[in-house]
Image (cartoon, grey):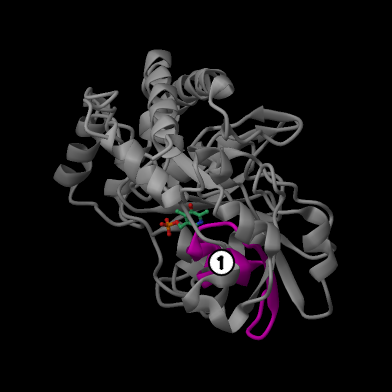
Amino acid sequence: MTSSPVRTEPWPEWPPPATDEQREALLAVLDSGRWGATDGPQVEEFAAAFAESTGAPHAVCTVNATVGLFLALRAVGVEPGDEVIVPAYTFVASATAVVLAGARPVFADVRPDTLLVDPDAAAALVGPRTGAVMAVHLSGAVADVGTPGVPVVEDAAQAHGAVRGGRAAGTWGDVACFSFQSSKAMTAGEGGVIVTGDRATYERLWSLHNVGRRLAGGWYEHPALGWNLRMTAFQAAVLRPQLAQLPGQIDRRTRSAAALAQALADVEGLSVRPAPPDTGRHTRHLALLRYDRAAFGGRTKEEFVVAMASEGIPLDAGYRSLSVEPSLAAYARPCPVAEAEAAATVWVRQNVLMADEDAMGDVARAARKVRDAFTRPV
Ligand SMILES: *Cc1c(COP(=O)(O)O)cnc(C)c1O
């Protein structure tokens, strides 16, 4: 494509520019000299505010969602040698957290439309060794949790603020983990939070992340085995004001995703994948697109992503199915839907969705131009 790109205007940055409130909160922690989770009130106050935003009564802040999932699995009783059912189309950390807990990920296939776990496929894998099922709320849509008869851990790393059937992400399983890594909807560069509705699970999580201490116990009293996986007060200071910003940002992305779906209606072979039924709020951490290579002259999604980039539209080729991920080959099992649909999926990231409706028109215009070029007879 030698013509001028469809779009030259820059896209919004993620994270958005820092606010005065964040700057002041961060400096207040710095000047206080009370930087650790156990030195000042910021981390516990943020945990309580985050829990409240989900409707779950308890939360523990931690260093990231990968170790958050590890802590969650341990807190619901997953032991070394257990199996944990994990959807095949997700970030690699959903599975490596299971390995970190000494357990074995067993990959469940996904639904062809939403790419969320297929609850029947997951239920069919539950057996005597199953320690937990992990429900991943991919792209900001709440997955079907089902009633597997074993503990459910929600991987809500992409789903801050998501709602389905009147219930928020974080209140569907026994315990749920959210991420504050730099690409996520709320971020401190790194960080995570684990929420639960169960007091005993909370006390185990708190102990596990705080070197085996017990609530209200002594500093050198370690009745359980645990690790230091605590968040800093700097992170809590940066995160706290974002709770109030989140709903407006989700609204912005929701309007853009709707505009994008509409703009793509007349681009054959490219569409926005649907939200699951009864979705109250899809947070549009990502808009997952279905890319039908047959309509694009047989070109792969990777070729499509490169061509779109040269038109000024940044897309992402996304994950491959974890069932074929080389580092997880020890756990490989066929997941035909995830493997096929991964090749037919491209992502629009949240920073692009933070742009307005007109910008979504640019995405569709670029896709049409790329398709014309891919299908032009040579
Ligand atoms: C980002 C992410 C994680 C890991 O979160 P970190 O905070 O980076 O460790 C886990 N699962 C999913 C689905 C994610 O998107």
In this view, 330 is above or below 84: below
| Highlighted range, magenta | 68-96
Quadrant for residue 89, please give it. bottom right
Where residue 81 sits in the image (x, y, percent)? 66, 86
Q: Is residue 72 magenta?
A: yes
Would you say the beta carbon of the disc 1 residue lies within 8 angstroms of ligand 1?
no
Identity of the residue drawn at 24% across and 53% down: 35
Where residue 230 sits in the image (x, y, percent)? 39, 61
- Residue 201 visible? The answer is yes
Task: Compare residues 344 and 16 and report the one nearer the observer.
Answer: 344
In this view, 279 is above or below 94: above
Where residue 365 sits in the image (x, y, percent)? 40, 22
Q: Is residue 86 magenta?
A: yes
The answer to whether 344 appears left or right of 308 in the picture is right
Task: Compare residues 110 and 203 and report the one nearer the observer.
Answer: 110
Task: Compare residues 72 and 267 and report the one nearer the observer.
Answer: 267
In this view, 117 is above or below 105: above
Identity of the residue drawn at 37% across and 19% down: 359
How packed is label 1: few (under 14 Cα within 10 Å), some, or many (20 or more)?
A: many
Pick the quarter of the image with the C terminus.
top left
Judged from the image, the secondary structure of the residue bearing numbered disc 1 is helix
Which residue is label 1 attached to?
Answer: 322
Q: Give amino acid for label 1.
A: Leu
Quadrant for residue 84, please give it. bottom right
